[in-house]
Image (cartoon, rainbow, N blue to C red):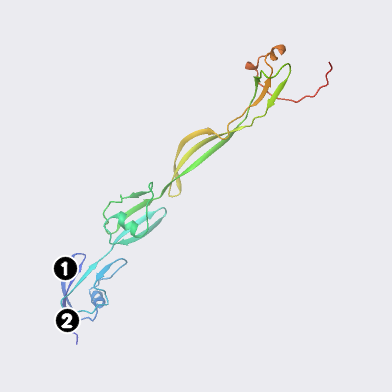
């Protein structure tokens, strides 16, 4: 015959005096309909034998329903703040990440929380800008001498910063515009005064096409 013995149960701060004839604490809790879930704490352990005058403390964990992207998970914790609860399960935030409610919010049972992962990414738009052909006087040349320097086209780059929240682009900000590489025009150097013999001025002349022609001449 197992005689009932008195014991005290403190469940989440509520004190209850009771009697139990069970052998173990786990059996006693089962009789009382008290179920232990993830992260619940009990002292002494459920395997402890029931003895007269023992005090049992049960602290149930609080549940946080956390939404991140398209998924929802439940976190069970004894921590006081949302920041501590997330850190406990290995969820650390980058500087731009966002949490609702704020990290300093106190944890309440079955609270709803949302974690938005925010990242930045550079985006570049490139377009080719064709080089021109220009005329420049060169004092080192004389008569009909010319010197040609071949340039190259340039690439105009527009740089943007993308803000990505949970894998979705939510913002696009212009950063800067530059050439990479810079345009280098084709240059035809000529002897000063030579163009006046042909009736045109380099300052108002646009080169549409350059052709190389070989000709025979006689003194």
Up/down of 7 relative to 117, above or below: below
Q: Secondary structure at mark 1?
A: strand
Position of 177 with respect to 29 (left or right) is right
At x 45%, y 49%, the residue is: 167
- Is label 1 in contact with label 2 (beta carbons under 8 Å)? no
At x 34%, y 50%, the residue is: 99
Q: Nearer the viewer, residue 80 or 183?
A: 183
The location of residue 132, given as percent across then percent down, is: 63, 26
Q: CA distance from mark 1 to mark 2?
A: 19 Å
Up/down of 189 relative to 180, above or below: above
Q: Nearer the viewer, residue 189 or 81?
A: 189
Up/down of 55 relative to 172, above or below: below
Which label number is shown at residue 15? 1
Rendering quarter of residue 91: bottom left
Q: Nearer the viewer, residue 176 or 56?
A: 176
Q: Check disc 2: other Cα within 10 Å, few if <14, some if 14-19, many if 20+.
A: some
At x 27%, y 68%, the residue is: 41
Q: Secondary structure at mark 2?
A: loop
Q: Quadrant of the C terminus?
A: top right
At x 35%, y 52%, the residue is: 114
Q: Quadrant of the N terminus?
A: bottom left
> What residue is pinned by disc 2?
4
Position of 213 with respect to 158 (left or right) is right
- The total of numbered circles placed on residues is 2
């Amino acid at each position: 015959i197992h005689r009932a013995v008195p014991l005290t149960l403190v469940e989440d701060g509520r004190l209850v005096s009771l009697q139990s004839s069970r052998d173990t604490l786990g059996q006693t809790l089962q009789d009382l309909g008290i179920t232990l879930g993830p992260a619940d704490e009990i002292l002494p352990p459920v395997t402890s034998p029931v003895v007269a005058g023992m005090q049992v403390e049960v602290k149930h964990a609080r549940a946080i329903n956390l939404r991140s992207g398209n998924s929802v998970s439940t976190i069970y914790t004894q921590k006081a703040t949302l920041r501590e609860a997330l850190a406990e399960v290995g969820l650390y935030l980058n500087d731009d990440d966002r949490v609702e409610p704020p990290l300093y919010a106190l944890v309440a049972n079955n609270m709803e929380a949302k974690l938005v992962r925010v990242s930045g990414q550079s985006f570049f738009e490139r377009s080719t800008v064709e080089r021109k052909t220009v005329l420049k006087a060169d004092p080192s040349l004389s008569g009909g001498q010319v010197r040609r320097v071949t340039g190259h086209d340039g690439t105009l780059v527009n740089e943007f910063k993308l803000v990505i929240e949970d894998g979705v682009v939510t913002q696009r900000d212009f950063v800067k515009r530059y050439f990479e590489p810079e345009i280098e025009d084709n240059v035809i150097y000529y002897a000063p005064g030579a163009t006046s013999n042909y009736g045109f001025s380099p300052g108002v002349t646009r080169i549409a096409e350059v052709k190389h022609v070989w000709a025979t001449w006689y003194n």
